[in-house]
Structures are given as C-alpha cells and as structure tokens.
Image: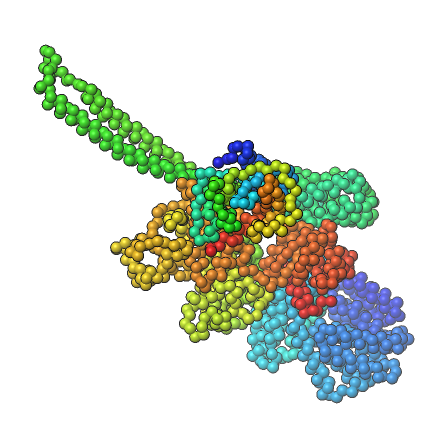
C-alpha cells in the first residue's frame, strides 16, 4: 500500500466526520446517522476498497448540501452510498428503510428550514444574477430561461410551494452544469420551466424552441471556446502564483493545444450526416491515441488513462453510429472541457476529480468502474504531486555542488551572454557597495538597492542560464525582501552573511568572466544563505539573530555524505578572455597589413629574380666575350711570334711570351667566371628568400584566419531563435509546420550571421504565411498534413549559401503578374517570362497581398530581404514550382581577408575587379570565336549571345578610342540570373587582394566593394561587377540609392512599436530580440525616467516595463502614463518576478493593463500585446 | 612629411594617449591654443589634441564615377584614407602662388585628408568667438551647418568646425554625379 491512498482515505474519513457534525448542528440527525454509518463502514474497509469508493464519496459533501437545501434526490443518493455492496454498512433492509424514512421526514420538516420568504427573495435575486452571467458567457438561451423563471416567480402571489422551492435551489448548480457541459442540465432547467405552479405562459412549441436553443448554443459555444484565449488564461491564472518551469509550461500548453484539435474535430461532426459522424469518430479515435501518447510523454499518466477510457467509449459509439446523438456529442465536449480545466489546475489537490466524476456518469456507454476510477485517481494525484512538486518545491534545505555551478549551457545565446558579462561586474560592484553600506549600519536605501540588484542579477543569470549566480541571488533576494519588511532582522550576524555572499558573488562573476577559478567556498556560502532564508521564513526563529553555523547545519551533513556529488569541474568551459571588439579589429587590420607587406616583398623578390636572370645572361655573355678575346689574343700571338725576336738561346716553343693584353684578358675571363659563381650563390639566396617569404605568407594567413576565428560562431546559436519564430508563426496562422535546419555545426562570422537573422526570420514567416497551405488544402493536394520548411547552411568557398525551402504552394505567378500590371510595371497582355516575374517580387514595396497580416506582409517584403542580402554583397535567387514549394537561395560573401581580383587600367584609373559574379574571361583574337554584333550591343560566343557593355560605360569614363580599336578582353558577369559581357582593354594581372573599407566616413560607393593596397603601395578601388551592372540598370536604379547606406535600407514602416523598459541590459535585449523576431519595432529605455523622456517625444503602441528599476519604477511609470493626456490610453504591461498580491494590486491601481509574472510564456506575452494593441486601435481601452 | 619648424607646429602628431577609435572632437578647446590651416580665404581651426599630419610624397589614387571633389584614396601606413578637395567642394579659387599640401585629420580608419594651402600654424591668444557664425554671410552652406565658433585673429576669420560631422555629411554625398 502506497502512502498516497492512505492519505486519501484519511482525508475522506475526516471529511465525512465533519459532515456528520454539521448535520447534527443543523438538527438533521438522520443525516448524521447516515454519515457516521458511512464513516464507520469505511474505517473497516481495506484501503484499496475504500479508495475504489472515493469517486462516489467525493460527491457526498455536495449531496449533504443538497439535502440541507431540501433537494429530493439527495436522500436517494446518500442511501445509494450506504447500499454499496463494497461498503458493508451492516444494515438490513428494514434498517435501510427506516433510515431513508427518517431522512425524508427530516427533509420535509418545515421547522428546521430557513425562512421561506427570505429564501424566495434571495432565489429571485440569484436567478436574475444567473441570467446576467449566462448573457456574459454568451448563453442567451439560458439567459432567456432564467429570465422567464424570474419573471414567472415575480408574478407568484405568495410563498413558493416546497417542490418548486427545492428545484429552484438547484438552479445555480444546473446553470453551472450547463456551462460546464454536463448532460442533464438542459433537461433539469426545462423541468423547472414546465412546473405547473410556475405560469411561464409558454406553449409546447415555445418549450421545444427554448430547449433546442439551449442545446444548440451549448454545442456552439463549447466549440467557439478555443484554447488560445480563455484556456491559456486559465492556465496562466493557475500558474501565476507558483511559477512553473518553461518545460512544464510547454508540455501543458502542448496538451491544451492538442485538446483544441480534438475540439475542432468534435465541432466538425454533423450529427444529421452519418458519414460525418463515422469519419469524425474515426479521426477522433486516432487523435485520442496521439493524445494518450502525448499525455504519457508529458508525465500525465492519469490523463492518458482517462483518454484511453474515453477512446473505449468512442469505439462503442462507432459500433452503433445511430446511437450517437447530440447528447453524446455534448458529453464528449463536456469531457474535453473538464480535460482543459484539469490542465489548468493540475497542481491543485482535487484536480481531475470532476473529470473523473463525469466519466462515471451513466450517460457514457461505458462509465468508468470504481476500480478503474481508483487507479486513475491515484495517477492524477501522483501527476499533480510529481510535476508540481518538481517545479514548485519549497525552498531547499541543502545546497548542492550543482547549485553553485558556473557552467554555461550548451545552447547559450552568445549575444545575451556578452551583455551579461558586460553588465554583471557593474551590478555586483553596486551590490557589494550596498551590502557594505548595510554592514556599516546603512539604512533602507542600501537594502533596497541590494535587493533590486539581486533581483536583476537573478533574472539576467536565469535568462542566460548560469545556475550558480541565479541560485545565490535568488535566496539573497528572499532574505533582503524579508529584511525590508522587518529591518530588525539585520543584526550583525546576517549582515556578515550578506557581506560574505557578496564576496562570493563577486568571485563567481570573476570566474564567469574568465579571470579566476570558481570560488571554493561557493557551496558553503550558498548553504549559509539558504539556512538564513529558511530561518527567516519561520516566525518563531526570526528573532533568533544567531549565525547558523555550518557545524550543526545541513552543509556539514552534506559535506559528510560521500553520496553528494563533488563540485562540478568546469572542464567544459575554456578560460575566456574578454577583449574589446575594436582591439580585435585592429589585430585583424594588422594581419591584413602583414599580408600586404608580404605581397610587396614578394613582388620585389620577383623583380630581383628577373634582374638576376638578366644579369646572368650578361655574365654569360661577358664570359663568352672573354673567351673570344683570349682566343683572339692567342691567335695574334702565334701569328706575330715568327717575326718577333725571341729570348736568346730559347726556341719560341720553349717559352711563352705574355704581354699585358694577355694578363688583362685572363683576368677578365676569371672575373666573368667569379661573377657567374657569385650570381649562382645569389640565386640560391634568392631561392631561400623566396622560401622564407612563402613560409611567412602562410604564417600570416594562418594568423589572420586565427583572428577571424574569434569572430566565428556556430550556426546552431541561432537555431533556437529560428525554431521559436517558426512556432510562433504557426500558432498565429493556425498552420502546422516543422522546421529542420542543416549545417548547424558550421562556423560563420558573427556579423554575417547577425545580418542574416532579419532576412531569415522574414523568409520563415513568409514561408508559413504565404507558402504553406492549410492542413485541408495540403491533404487535398496529396501532401503530408504538416508542412515542412528546411533551412540549409552550406559554405562554398568564400561564400555562405543559405537555402530556405518550403513545400508549400510556391509562387503564384498569376498574382505576381496581376500585381505588376496593377502597378503599371508591365503592360496587360504582354509576354513576360516567369524569371522576369520573379524579379518583380524583389522590387521595392512589391506585394501581391492587398491586406497585411500579422505575420508577414507588414511592409517588409521580399524586396527588403533582397536589399539586405545585396547590402552584404550577396545575391538572392528564387526557384519555384507552383504547388510544390519555393526555394530561396542567398549567397552571402564571408568577410574573408582575401579576394581574387583582376587588375586593369582605364584612363587614369587603376582598378581591381573582384572575381565576384565573373563566370568567364574571354580573350578576343582571330580564333577566339567571339563576335561583337549590333554595334557593340551584343557579344556572340558560339551559339550564345550576351548583352554587352564596356567598363568605361559602366564607370562613366569617357574613352578616346579609334573606331578600329577593338576590346581585347570580355568578362561574362552573372547578375540576377542574367549574364552580361563587359568589355575592356586588358587584364594586367590576376592576384589575391585584401579588400579594405573606404574608411569611416565613406560608407559605400555603388559598384565599389572597397579598396586594395597593391604591391607597390598604391591603392586601387575594387569593383563589384554585378552591383555595377545593377546600378546602371534603370529599372533597378532605386536599389542603388537604397544600398548606399545601410540606414537607408527599406525598413519595416508601419510596424507596431513596443517600448521596453528594464534596467537589466540582458533582460531588455532578450525582450527586444523576442519582439523583433515576432515582427515588432522595438525601442528600449533603462528606467522609468528614460522611458518618460522618450514618451515625451514619441508614442509607441504599447509599453512593456519591469517593476523594480532605479529612479522611476514600473508602477510610477504606469501612473505617469495614465496622467498624461496624450498617453493615458497607451497599453502598459508590467513584467516582474514579484508574485505578491500587494504588488499586483499596486500595478492595477496604477492602471497597468496586465501584470505578468516571470517566467512569462512568450506566446502568451505576444498574444496579450497583440490583443492590447488591437483593443487600443479599436478604442476599446478606457 | 612631418612639419619641423616651430612656426609650422612641431607637434602635429597628437598627444600619445589619444585613442584611435575616438571620434574627432568638436572644434572647442579650453586651452585657447588651436591649430589653424587655410583653404583659399577660409581659415579652419583644429584642437591641438587632435591627431593630424602633413603628408608628402604620397600619390592620390583616383576613383572613377564619384563627385569631382572626391579626389581619390591614399595609403597612409596601411589605412585607406579618402582625399577631398575643399576648393572644389566649396568652390574656392585655387591660389597658384601658394603650395598645396595634403593634410590628414584623424587617426586609423577615422582619417580624412584635405588639400590645404601652405603649412598649418599654431594660433595663440584667439579673441572671443564672434556672436553667431550662422549670421556670417560668406560661409558656404555645407560648412554653416557644422560651424561651432568663428574667431578673428590678425584680421583673418577662423572657423572652428565639427569636422567629424562635416566629414560624415560628405560621405553620404559621394554618389555618382
């Protein structure tokens, strides 16, 4: 036997005992006897059997109430319990009859009843209220019924007959039942109206009409009662007090959403059409199977069992379709309503009880048996206990090593982390100063600062996911809040602990920022803080101002237990160093300089080699000349020797005779030989030098790439944002779509990735809103029910290819054509290819939609995406097959250091032409196969003809050419899917260059990528041929102007603007990111004062503010807004982690439209924002 | 070439602690000592804390398809620096008797080079600024928006300019003519 049923049984026993007492107090001794008999019999039952009876017993309080109010069936119901075979009450038939008699008599005893007149009066008023309530809920039939009753009652001359009086006492309950969808409610209400004593003046037809209306409107409203508004609100209300984790919220939300699907299926069933019933029940059965799985996965085992049981009933319905009537449909809808109620309150102790009770109703072909009910109830209770306890556990007693871990989560948002690391040191310093102030006897001001900072840091750390800091600040905040309420707590003991905690927090922050290892004493400090937080919570211990010592507290025990995990090693977190981005840019620039210098040195070396080669030729010639000279001298010597006088006594053959000419020629030959040797040595040195420069080049390149890597971030870092955006869009458009991302491991320059976010978000929203069809359309088209969008990231050389592919309906060329015709871009009836139509979509402000939607179509169109891609120097192409989807490919150049370029000169200009977009280089000549036709307008290459232009024309350079002078080179350049031939005179070199920006002051020149420093130190502008071609195209001239400055890009004008006010940069940024992703324009302010200043200058559509902020808090800001004439209708939402009613009431009093408690569900926030903006626009806000 | 005579401001380079990323300060200075250079009849003032240098033996590399006053680009120690010709921009006649020098203002990528007439001079003891530079009739519109103060020194009018904003405004006008 588990602990849970024992508790349950005890609870029931206790409750029945109280009922008996109450009955005795009211003089209902028969009822007292009945209750005591039940309690006694239950006490003797085994636990399991008692548990089996619990669903029935759960009704006992209600029946006792009914009895006391004089309702007839109560006697029957109570007697039924006593007659349960499982409950051995030990009575025989006579006893039962006696007891029943006594109960009935006491019920009819007028002496023990309330004053009838008062009851009549009150019931009259109540009925009027019931009518109002019915009208508020949209149940106008019910309102009519109530008003009819009230009217008829008003005309009755005297006290009500008892029967009518009893029936009326039940009316509120029946109205409740009606609203909750319980079956017999309509019948019961109609019964009252049909009471002969009540002259309603209706005939049978009227009755039938009213009954029909009651039945129909209940079905209708149950369908309308969608999950997105009220149910989600219910969940929020339920969870507002004990905040649940995002994971649980998402699970519950998922189940609620699935329930709405089932609801839709039910709504689609047309009872009068058997085919609809058959299909509907079949789909319902399938959907329920999925729901069972989802419930099991979410840990809602009890709910899964219930669904299983309902599915068993549906199978019975399917076996006999004719028996499936409106009542059964209403029954299912009522059941679903209970499911939603259960999901909204699953953490409460009696959650699911109504759900289970309804399932026990005889209206089901297969009501839940007592045994099953017991099992299900146990599971329902377990769900509430497990899921809720897990999330809203009471403050823990022992600090674990995990609680102080400073490890960053794997999916950390780098931008938010960066902001956190930036703001943390400042905040912690503030905190420490405030705590020091407290330590030195400071006042409430220090306390408030410390509390506010702890609160802010907690929020920021939670947002980023640094558990250690979030935990410590969380408990510190608890203590500080308690201290602000009772400053006597702040004895030296606590002040000392706070100071210690502040030090620890500082050490933690230092560790996170990478300068030191994590503090050793973090766990101990957290334990002390925890002990204090727990101690303060217990009033009897609050005044004991003693430092809880570790020796006798939990921490020591924790340390002593070997089972507790040791401090988590921070092995996965490499030591980080924060460096100013500017410094990195400098390093990058210097590395670029090195490359340039290296290439200059290489250039010099090349020239030296050439000179040496020339010198070697000269040396060779010199040596040859020397040889020739020597030969000549020798010849001359021989010829002259016969005539000369030799030395006396020696034959001329015996002694060579040399003159100075000989010596000189010999020396010359030797010098030439030496020079050659030296040239060879120098050549070797040059080769070595060449090798060194090559080594240096690879080293420099590596250096630059390493520096580049500091800017690289994985694509995975934006995956979550994309998924989130996708989910939101799906919810807004009520479509089902999955997003898969490939290439997440790819590392891309952070700036490029950030620049890609906006276009990507827009493409995703576009894909879902315009591309993916509804589930019905998809099924009809033979596609899977759920749409699929894929985003692929692929690196191709120096470019990144981002491909967004959806399997939706594809481009609607007819609509594009119609829109283009409307705008006068094409003449009606003219022949326009699909490729040309595709280019129209990319034009500024082109939209095929006549109305804007919440998700896309809000002023930001494909043109903006195109412009953003162009601004990054990229290209965008569209491929679409109608009915099969759209593929958008964006090629974005990566800001790599080097780019391949061709060098050319034209007039006084020396230009580098980036290889971007160049498909082919053609050299003209006799056998080149190139023909320039149409007076230079076209270039013919084989069978292909390309439009032609010259570089001079593109650059507006006047060329002085002879008519016969031909261009020698043609570049085939691809631009927007079209290839153009650009002709020039020569390409002087082809080399790798480093493209640099044109300095801080010159942002962009159309057609020029930047400038490159050449080997000789001169500067050459680098041409971007595709851009140059676009800039001269008259049709696209608007682009050129837009591209000049990123600030001039087509922006989302007309988007709703949100002013986000929060003193925490990371919170501010997180909200900003969420709202921007959802398609809002966002401005931010750091506190109320800054917000007020901004509000003086512009009026946003809505204000989102934090509660606690320096200078002016959220409540003061709200009051300020409400007092300004031009702002008083501005919607304000306060978002805070303060859960107390006091704060909530203050916010309401100040005029806040919503008070949301963190963690706030993103969807919920967006829905509320949208709702408020729409209400404000419709003038519905006060 | 770095100026070397006392007359032409030995310390044309900036104070050593200035950061390259700092924007060019406005023309205001507390010290009362300013650096003056001339373009035609106009005199311009720079705070002495600002890094600037006279350049010699550097050739300007022209760029096609831009406004004529945008002369081209320079390579100053690996930084690409745009060169503007204020004579052309402001329609000031070129004095053929005075030698023109290239004068770079700023540091790192926040540098702009101008053609100036003669060497820059250090100006001491500037009198109080004139009441309103905007009321001066001779000031071209492009300058008027960025002029901070106007001084008279030895009979010459000197203009203290927000060079940073002035250069930025030029950067947006370098589209093809």
Quarter of the rendering occupied by the N terminus of chain A: bottom right
Percent coordinates x, y for residue A334 in the rendering: 68, 72
Depth order, front residue of A304/A775: A775
**Residue visible at 75% across and 58% down?**
A1120
**Residue visible at 75% across and 78% down?**
A143
In this rendering, is residue B122 above or below A889? Answer: above
Residue found farthest to the left: A642
Depth order, front residue of A956/A1091: A956
**Residue visible at 40% across and 45% down?**
A992
In this rendering, is residue A311 above or below B130? Answer: below
Asked if residue A583 lies left or right of residue A599, the reply is right
Residue found farthest to the top: A649
Asked if residue A432 lies left or right of residue B25, the reply is right
Kindly indicate the quadrant of the structure image that contains residue A761.
Answer: bottom right
In this rendering, is residue A257 above or below B101? Answer: below
Percent coordinates x, y for residue B79 in the rendering: 49, 42
Depth order, front residue of A50/A1047: A1047
In this rendering, is residue A976 above or below A602? Answer: below
Percent coordinates x, y for residue A1107 in the rendering: 72, 54
Percent coordinates x, y for residue B17 in the rendering: 59, 36
Q: How is the image coloured?
A: rainbow
Depth order, front residue of A168/A760: A760
- Whether residue A589 is visible, yes or no, is no
Residue found farthest to the right: A111
**Residue visible at 77% across and 70% down?**
A81
Quarter of the rendering occupied by the C terminus of chain A: bottom right
- Whether residue A1151 is visible, yes or no, is yes
């Amino acid at each position: 036997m588990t602990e849970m049923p024992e508790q349950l049984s005890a609870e029931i026993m206790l409750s029945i005992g109280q009922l008996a007492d109450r009955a005795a107090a009211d003089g209902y001794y028969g009822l007292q006897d009945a209750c005591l008999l039940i309690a006694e019999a239950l006490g003797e039952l085994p636990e399991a059997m008692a548990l089996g009876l619990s669903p029935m017993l759960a009704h006992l309080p209600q029946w006792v109430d009914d009895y006391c109010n004089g309702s007839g069936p109560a006697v029957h119901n109570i007697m039924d319990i006593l007659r349960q075979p499982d409950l051995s009450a030990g009575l025989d038939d006579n006893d039962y009859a006696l007891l029943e008699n006594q109960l009935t008599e006491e019920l009819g005893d007028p002496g023990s009843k309330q004053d009838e007149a008062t009851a009549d009066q009150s019931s009259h008023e109540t009925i009027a209220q019931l009518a109002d309530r019915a009208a508020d809920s949209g149940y106008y039939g019910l309102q009519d019924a109530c008003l009819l009753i009230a009217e008829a009652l008003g005309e009755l001359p005297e006290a009500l007959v008892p029967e009518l009086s009893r029936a009326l006492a039940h009316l509120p309950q029946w109205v409740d039942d009606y609203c909750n969808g319980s079956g017999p409610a309509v019948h019961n209400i109609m019964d009252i109206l049909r009471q002969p004593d009540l002259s309603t003046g209706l005939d049978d037809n009227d009755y039938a009409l009213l009954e029909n209306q009651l039945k129909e409107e209940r079905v209708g409203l149950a369908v309308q009662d969608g999950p997105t508004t009220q149910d989600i609100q219910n969940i929020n209300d339920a969870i507002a007090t004990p905040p649940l984790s995002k994971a649980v919220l998402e699970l519950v939300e998922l189940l609620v959403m699935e329930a709405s699907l089932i609801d839709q299926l039910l709504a689609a069933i047309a009872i009068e059409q058997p085919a609809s019933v058959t299909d509907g029940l079949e789909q319902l059965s399938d959907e329920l199977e999925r729901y069972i799985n989802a419930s099991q996965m979410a840990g809602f085992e009890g709910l899964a069992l219930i669904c299983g049981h309902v599915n068993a009933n549906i199978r019975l319905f399917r076996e006999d379709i004719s028996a499936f009537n409106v009542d059964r449909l209403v029954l299912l809808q009522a059941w679903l309503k209970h499911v939603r109620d259960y999901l909204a309150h699953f953490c409460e102790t009696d959650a699911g009880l109504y759900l289970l009770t309804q399932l026990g109703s005889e209206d089901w072909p297969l009501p839940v048996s007592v045994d099953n009910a017991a099992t299900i109830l146990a599971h329902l209770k377990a769900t509430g206990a497990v899921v809720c306890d897990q999330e809203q556990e009471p403050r823990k007693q022992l600090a674990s090593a995990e609680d102080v871990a400073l490890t960053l989560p794997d999916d950390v948002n780098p931008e938010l982390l960066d902001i956190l690391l930036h703001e943390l040191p400042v905040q912690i310093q503030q905190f420490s100063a405030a705590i020091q102030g407290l330590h030195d006897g400071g006042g409430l001001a220090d306390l408030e600062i410390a509390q506010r900072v702890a609160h802010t840091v907690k929020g920021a750390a939670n947002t980023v996911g640094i558990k250690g800091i979030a935990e410590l600040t969380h408990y510190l905040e608890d203590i500080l809040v308690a201290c602000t309420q009772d400053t006597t707590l702040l004895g030296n003991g606590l002040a000392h602990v706070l100071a210690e905690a502040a030090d620890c927090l500082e050490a933690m922050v230092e560790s996170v920022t990478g300068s030191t290892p994590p503090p050793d004493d973090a766990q101990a400090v957290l334990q002390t803080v925890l002990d204090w937080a727990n101690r303060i919570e217990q009033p009897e211990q609050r005044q004991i101002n003693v430092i809880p010592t570790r020796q006798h507290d939990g921490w020591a025990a924790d340390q002593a237990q070997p089972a507790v995990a040791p401090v988590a090693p921070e092995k996965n977190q490499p030591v980080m160093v924060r460096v100013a981005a500017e410094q990195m840019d400098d390093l990058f620039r210097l590395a670029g300089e090195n490359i340039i210098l290296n290439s200059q040195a290489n250039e010099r070396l090349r020239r030296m080699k050439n000179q040496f080669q020339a010198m070697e030729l000269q040396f060779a010639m010199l040596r040859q000349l020397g040889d020739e000279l020597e030969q000549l001298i020798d010849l001359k010597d021989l010829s002259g020797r016969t005539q000369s006088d030799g030395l006396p006594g020696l034959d001329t053959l015996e002694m060579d005779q040399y003159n100075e000419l000989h010596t000189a020629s010999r020396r010359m030959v030797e010098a030439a030989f030496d020079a050659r040797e030296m040239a060879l040595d120098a050549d070797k040195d040059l080769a070595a030098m060449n090798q060194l420069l090559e080594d240096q080049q690879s080293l420099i390149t590596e250096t630059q790439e390493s520096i580049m890597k500091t800017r690289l971030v994985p694509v995975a870092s934006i995956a979550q944002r994309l998924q989130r955006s996708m989910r939101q869009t799906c919810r807004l458009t009520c479509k089902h779509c999955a997003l898969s991302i490939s290439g997440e491991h790819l590392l891309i320059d952070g700036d490029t990735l950030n620049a890609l976010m906006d276009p990507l978000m827009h493409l995703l929203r576009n894909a879902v809103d315009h591309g993916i069809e509804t589930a019905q359309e998809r099924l009809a088209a033979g596609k899977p029910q759920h749409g699929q969008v894929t985003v692929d990231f692929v690196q191709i050389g120096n470019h990144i290819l981002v491909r967004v592919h959806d399997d939706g309906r594809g481009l609607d060329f007819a609509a594009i054509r119609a829109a283009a015709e409307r705008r006068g871009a094409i003449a009606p009836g003219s022949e326009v290819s699909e490729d040309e139509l595709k280019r129209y979509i990319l034009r500024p402000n082109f939209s095929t939609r006549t109305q804007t939607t919440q998700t896309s179509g809000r002023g930001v169109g494909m043109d903006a995406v195109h412009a953003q891609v162009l601004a990054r120097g990229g290209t965008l192409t569209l491929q679409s097959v109608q009915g099969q989807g759209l593929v958008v490919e964006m090629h974005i150049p990566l800001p790599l250091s080097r780019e391949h370029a061709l060098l050319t000169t034209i007039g006084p200009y020396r230009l580098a032409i980036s290889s971007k977009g160049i498909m082919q280089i053609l050299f003209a000549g006799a056998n080149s196969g190139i023909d320039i036709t149409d007076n230079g307008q076209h270039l013919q290459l084989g069978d292909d003809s390309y439009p032609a232009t010259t570089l001079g024309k593109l650059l507006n350079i006047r060329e002085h050419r002879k008519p016969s002078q031909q261009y020698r080179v043609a570049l085939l350049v691809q631009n927007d899917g079209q290839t153009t031939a650009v002709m020039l005179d020569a390409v002087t070199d082809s080399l790798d260059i480093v493209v640099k920006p044109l300095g801080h002051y010159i942002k962009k020149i159309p057609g020029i990528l930047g400038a490159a420093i050449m080997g000789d130190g001169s500067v050459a502008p680098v041409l971007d041929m595709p851009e140059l071609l676009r800039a001269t195209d008259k049709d696209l001239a608007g682009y050129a102007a837009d591209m000049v400055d990123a600030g001039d890009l087509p922006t989302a004008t007309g988007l709703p603007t949100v002013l986000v006010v929060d003193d925490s940069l990371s919170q501010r940024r997180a909200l900003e990111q969420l709202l921007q992703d959802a398609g809002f324009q966002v401005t931010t302010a750091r506190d109320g004062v800054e917000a007020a200043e901004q509000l003086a200058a512009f009026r946003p559509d809505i204000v989102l503010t934090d509660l606690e902020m320096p200078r002016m808090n959220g409540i003061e800001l709200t009051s300020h807004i409400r007092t300004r004439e031009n702002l008083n209708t501005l919607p304000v939402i306060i978002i805070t982690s303060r859960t107390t009613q006091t704060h909530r009431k203050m916010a309401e009093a100040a005029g806040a439209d919503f008070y949301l408690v963190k963690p706030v569900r993103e969807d919920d926030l967006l829905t509320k924002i949208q709702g408020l903006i729409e209400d404000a626009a419709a003038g519905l806000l006060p | 070439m770095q100026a070397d005579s006392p007359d032409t401001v030995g310390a044309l380079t900036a104070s050593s602690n200035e950061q390259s990323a700092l924007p060019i300060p406005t023309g205001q200075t507390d010290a009362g000592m300013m650096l003056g250079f001339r373009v035609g009849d106009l005199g311009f003032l720079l705070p002495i804390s600002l890094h600037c240098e006279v350049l010699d033996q550097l050739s300007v590399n022209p760029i096609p398809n831009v406004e004529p006053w945008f002369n081209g680009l320079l390579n100053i120690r690996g930084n690409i620096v745009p060169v503007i010709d204020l004579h052309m921009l402001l329609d000031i006649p070129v004095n053929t008797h005075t030698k023109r020098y290239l004068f770079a203002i700023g540091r790192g990528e926040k540098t702009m080079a101008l053609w100036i007439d003669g060497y820059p001079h250090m100006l001491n003891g500037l009198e109080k600024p004139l009441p309103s530079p905007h009321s001066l009739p001779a000031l071209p519109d492009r300058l008027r928006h960025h002029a901070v103060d106007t001084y008279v020194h030895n009979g010459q009018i000197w203009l203290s300019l927000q060079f940073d904003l002035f250069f930025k405004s030029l950067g947006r006008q370098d589209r093809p003519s």
